[in-house]
Amino acid sequence: MSAAASSQTGTIARSAGTVGIAVFCSRILGLVREQVLANFFGAGMAMDAFVVAFRIPNLLRDLFAEGALSAAFVSVFTEYDQRRGKQSTWRLANNVLVTLTLLVGGIALVGILSAHHLVRLMAPDFGLVAGKMGLTVIMTQIMFPFLPMISLAAVVMGILNTKGRFFLPAMASSFFNLGSILTGVALALILPSYGVPAIIGMAIGTLLGGVLQLAVQVPSLYRTGYRCQWVMDWRDEGLRRIFVLMTPAIIGLSATQINVFINTFFASSCAEGSVAWLNYAFRLLQFPIGVFGVAISIATMPVVSRYAAHRDYEGLKQAFTSSLVMTLLITVPASVGLAILAEPIIALIFQHGRFTASDTGQTAAALVFYTLGLFAYSGVKVVVPVFYALNNTRYPVMGSFLAVGANLIFVLLTLDQLQHRAIALATSLSMILNFGFLSVVLYFKMQGYPLAHLGRCLVKICLAASVMGVGVHFLAVWLPPHFGTGIFSQMALLGILLAAGLLLYTLVLSFLRVPELQELIRQVHGLRKRIKPPEENV
């Protein structure tokens, strides 16, 4: 690997490592939140209703917060920050924040008023169960204001990331989880005394968690030099460029949301609990995606945007390649480990209270199929920001709609045989197709990138993950008779299996000499000495 490539690997690894630690905290709290939900509500009617109710504003959040808006804003804001001076940069920020507040606030209001129609459209079979439709509608109305809160939080995160501040914005989602857990549990215990379903408390907690996620970032935003001003100029060049970038991206991301809609529609027609089983399984899958895929994506976006702004395409290629290899380094073994250890992991985390052994088996079956597409989920999060940096959003749109068509075909072909597992399988296969399509298109758009290096690394990673998988499978069969059935015994057993797998995978990769692994190891050691990430210099 060249000196330039090593430099970019180090830059991205440092930022990704910092973000990864913060996101790790958030995902741990997210798992605690799911544990609370599983313990209190299991996988029955209340949980199905909560998942669908939260999914409706969540679909729009992916469009306006973590999707089209975030990527488009970072691209334009970075260019302003690099070339146009502080006054123009902060004016753009205020213009976006004011416009977004009015626009997304209006969408949330419409959503509250039309919640009944939205729920009936997404989960029509809920009407067959007494009280299920009404409960879902009420929680949808409660959680819709979550949308503007989280959208504003995403813009603030984009500003802070561009200014080289990664840790606190990534930690903000921890405050969302913490707020939703504490408030939700308290209200879930209190509300039944007043004749209100306990699950309503979790819906209110979700809303307050969104408020916290925004509020915790505001002091850091002011420390970067930002000052709040009322600016609403629809003719502003920067705002128009953001909307121009957003429009095709929204169309593309709407395809992803159509996938979610299709999956929810079909899941609601399967056995009761199917929506919840798929949700719990996907939440576990989101752990490695969030900690590693999103972390690397967040760290990569400002770097590739700067290279694109300076027309340094060679540096752009090196940054992209390093990011993709680091993503594969982590997600491929994570897929193998999750597939092999699906049942013990789910039993340890969720099988308490109203979450039964049967729920564990059904959730594990879905998780195994979801793991097939883990590398593609994370890979897309690395590939798409490069298209945004190049101001080319057409192909991500095409890839998304390709995935929608493939997902629908796969579901229809396998639903009768596999039931809710068909949805997990179809989701993975469609995402793999999307990732393959975007990778090929980007190769030609960038006039090539180090394909030989990627290929060599991928072969080594798959070989190491295979060795790890065989070793972990053997231990998973041999060790359990030597451990008890108590929770601490199961924690110890799972800890030994995970540690053995990590050690075996690292040893094999070290022997095979993957440069990005050595850089990641160096950054892990360096994190112990750093309190906050350094400013990137390109």
Image: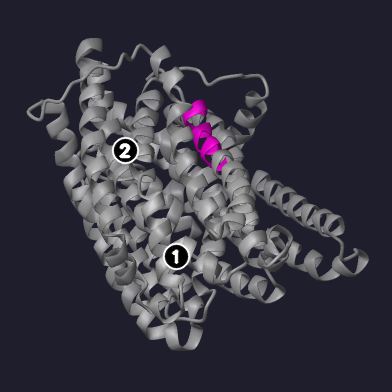
Tell me if residue 251 comes above or below residue 128 in the rendering: above
Q: Amino acid at mark 1?
A: Leu
User: In which image quadrant can residue 348 be found?
Assistant: bottom right
* Upstream in sequence: badge 2 or badge 1: 2
Q: Please state the horizontal and vertical placement of residue 305, each as a whole percent of the image.
A: 30, 31
Give me the C-alpha separation between circle 2 and circle 1: 32 Å
Q: Amino acid at mark 2?
A: Ser
Q: Please state the horizontal and vertical placement of residue 514, each as a whole percent of the image.
A: 57, 43
Tell me if residue 130 comes above or below residue 162 in the rendering: below
In the image, is residue 176 part of the stretch drawn in magenta?
yes
| Marker disc for residue 70 | 2
Quadrant placement of the C terminus: top left
| Residue sitting nearer the eye, 115 or 379 | 115
Q: Please state the horizontal and vertical placement of residue 16, each as a whole percent of the image.
A: 51, 34
Q: Is residue 1 visible?
A: no
Q: Please provide the residue range marked out in magenta.
A: 167-177
Residue at position x 51%, y 50% in the image: 289
Helix or strand or loop: what does disc 1 sit on? helix
Helix or strand or loop: what does disc 2 sit on? helix
Q: Please state the horizontal and vertical placement of residue 319, each as a whole percent of the image.
A: 39, 35
The kind of secondary structure the magenta stretch mainly shows is helix
User: In which image quadrant can residue 497 be found?
Assistant: bottom right
The residue that disc 1 covers is 135
In the image, is residue 271 part of the stretch drawn in magenta?
no
Residues packed near mark 1 inside 10 Å, few (<14), some (14 to 19) or many (20 plus): some
Residue farthest to the bottom, as pictured: 416
Residue 92 left/right relative to 3: left
Residue 340 left/right relative to 383: right
| Residue sitting nearer the eye, 266 or 179 | 179
